[in-house]
């Protein structure tokens, strides 16, 4: 496998700059961050990381999100993961395409934060309609599979790159509504994600030759569940391949992470942006 710097595709959370207990805010609702604060600047830097196009997205505001019930659900899930004594995201043996799958996990691992209690977490983006944010605060993220079919399995979809999430928030991948006009305010959520055992979707193992989609999606039927023995899927996708998985994960532009249940996610920040 070829090697390549991951500085353009990953942004690793920092305990030093971000805080070990940063998601333990006990408030409920939204609270604006001071644009001069270190926390605001950290989230802004994460927003700017991993861009693959010359498009410019400008932050209008950043708010910390307090989700009392989803917060408790997330902590319960984390405690379950901690009790299971997970050794990381590479703790499953793959039966085929092993070098490519390990390379895909290397790409994902660059964004994983090791917590003091041993739980592996990452920060990931989700593009949403601003009108659903109040419902998310009350109930957490809703699995995309309940309303639409994801190409890489049923679950909650997030991405490591804000640029990719921006395109989703603007409606560019929707076949139901027209994309929002340039300059329109749109919303991203930056979430903590506890991934557990991750299955990397690779072309050799997970695509049938001659088809455009992975085996985790059935046209006309929808997406299948997360693979047995795993709690998340990871798909490194390429623009040139219409956002499907290329043969080599190092040729990917963006990363999609699909977790089995919303309890694995905790919205932490709302970022309102516009394209300029």
Image (cartoon, rainbow, N blue to C red):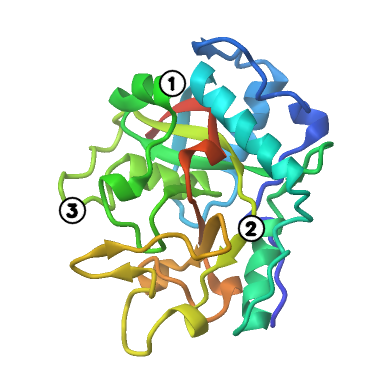
x 54%, y 56%: residue: 232
Q: Is residue 178 above or below residue 235?
A: above
Say which element carries label 2. loop
Q: In this view, does 189 lie above or below 24?
A: below
Q: Earlier in the sequence, mark 2 or mark 3?
A: 3
Residue 41, located in which quarter of the rendered image?
top right
User: Which residue, given by chain and number where applicable, does mark 2 sit on?
Assistant: 197
Judge left or right: residue 6 versus residue 17.
Answer: left
Tell me residue 124's x, y (percent).
56, 43
Judge left or right: residue 2 versus residue 157.
Answer: right
- Asked if residue 75 can be seen in this view, the reply is yes
Badge 2: residue crowd in 10 Å (few <14, some 14–19, many ≥20): many
x 50%, y 20%: residue: 69
In the drawing, what numbered circle is on residue 175? 3
x 40%, y 39%: residue: 127
Say which element carries label 1. helix
- Position of the N terminus, as image quadrant, is bottom right
Mark 2 or 1, closer to the camera: 2
Say which element carries label 3. loop
Tell me residue 138's x, y (percent).
41, 19
Contact? badges 3 and 1 (CB < 8 Å): no
Q: Which of marks 2 and 1 is nearer the N terminus?
A: 1
Q: Nearer the viewer, residue 38 or 244?
A: 244
User: Which residue, given by chain and number where applicable, does mark 1 sit on?
Assistant: 137
Tell me residue 157's x, y (percent).
43, 49
Rounded to the nearest whole Å, what is the CA distance between mark 2 and mark 1?
26 Å
Q: Which of marks 3 and 1 is nearer the N terminus?
A: 1
Question: Number of marks in the image?
Answer: 3
């Amino acid at each position: 496998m070829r090697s390549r710097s991951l500085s353009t595709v990953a942004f690793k959370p920092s305990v030093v700059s971000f805080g070990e207990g940063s998601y333990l805010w006990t408030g409920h609702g939204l609270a604006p961050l001071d644009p001069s604060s270190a926390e605001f600047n950290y989230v802004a830097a994460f927003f700017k990381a991993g861009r693959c196009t010359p498009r410019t997205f400008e932050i209008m505001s950043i708010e910390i999100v307090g989700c009392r019930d989803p917060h408790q659900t997330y902590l319960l899930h984390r405690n379950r993961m901690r009790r299971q004594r997970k050794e990381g995201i590479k703790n499953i043996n793959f039966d085929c395409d092993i070098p490519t799958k390990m390379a895909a996990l290397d790409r994902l691992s660059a964004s994983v934060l090791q917590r003091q209690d041993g739980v592996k977490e990452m920060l990931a983006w989700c593009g949403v309609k601003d009108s659903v944010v109040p419902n998310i605060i009350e109930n957490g993220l809703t699995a995309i599979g309940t309303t639409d079919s994801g190409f890489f399995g049923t679950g909650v979809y997030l991405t490591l790159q804000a640029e990719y999430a921006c395109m989703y928030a603007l409606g560019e991948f929707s076949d139901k509504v027209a994309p929002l006009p340039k300059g329109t305010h749109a919303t991203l959520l930056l979430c903590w994600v506890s991934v557990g055992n991750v299955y990397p979707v690779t072309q050799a193992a997970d695509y049938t030759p001659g088809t455009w989609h992975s085996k985790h999606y059935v046209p006309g039927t929808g997406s299948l569940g997360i693979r047995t023995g795993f709690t998340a899927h990871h798909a490194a996708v390429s623009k040139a391949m219409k956002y499907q998985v290329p043969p080599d994960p190092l040729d990917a532009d963006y990363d999609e992470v699909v977790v089995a249940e919303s309890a694995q996610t905790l919205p932490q920040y709302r970022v309102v942006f516009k394209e300029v």
